[in-house]
Amino acid sequence: MDLSTMTDDALDQLRRDVLIEQERRQKLEQLPEQVAAMTRDALAAGVPTDTLRAALDDALTPAAEEPTA
């Protein structure tokens, strides 16, 4: 990829795409620990385990499997 031949618009789009990918990778690395920390906090606050499991199961259910209203 020769950046010197790219238009300003194409170069700016590439920059945005790179930033979006960097953010996605950062989230991929950080989110599992954040979920674990939130789970520990919820348990310490007295949220029942079944409630947490139901919330996670709901979050993990793909939109295609969700019932339509």
Image (tube, grey):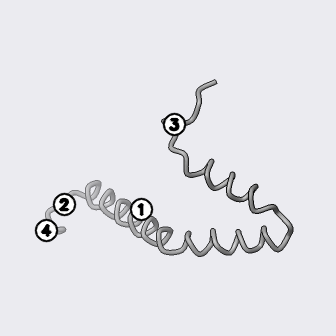
Q: Which residue is mark 3?
A: 65
Res. 20 mark: 1
Other residues around mark 1 within 10 Å, as few (<14) / some (14–19) / many (≥20): few
**Disc 3 or disc 2, which is closer to the eye?**
3
Residue 40, quarter of picture: bottom right
Residue at the image point whose x is 38% and y is 60% from the top? 16
Q: Secondary structure at mark 3?
A: helix
What residue is pinned by disc 2?
Answer: 6
Q: What's under tag 2, amino acid-wise?
A: Met
Q: Earlier in the sequence, mark 3 or mark 2?
A: 2
Q: Tell me the amino acid under the disc marked 1.
A: Ile
Q: Counting residues from the N terminus, which is met first, the one under dot 3 or under dot 4?
A: 4
The residue nearer to you, when weighing 31 against 21, is: 31
> Is the Cβ of the residue at disc 1 closer than 8 Å to that at disc 2?
no
Earlier-in-chain disc, 1 versus 2: 2
Frontmost of labels 3 and 1 is 3
Q: Residue furthest top?
A: 69
Q: Residue at x 60, y 51 (%)?
A: 59
User: x and y percent of residue 29 in the render?
Assistant: 48, 74
Evaluate if marks 4 and 2 touch, with contact meaning CB atoms under 8 Å apart.
Answer: yes
Residue 28, position as x, y percentages in the image: 47, 68
Give the residue number, with chain letter if any, for mark 4. Answer: 2
Residue type pointed to by label 3: Glu
Quadrant position of the N terminus in the picture: bottom left
Q: Residue 35 location, x and y as percent?
A: 63, 68
Q: Is residue 29 left or right of residue 18?
A: right
Mark 3 vs mark 4, CA separation in Å = 44 Å
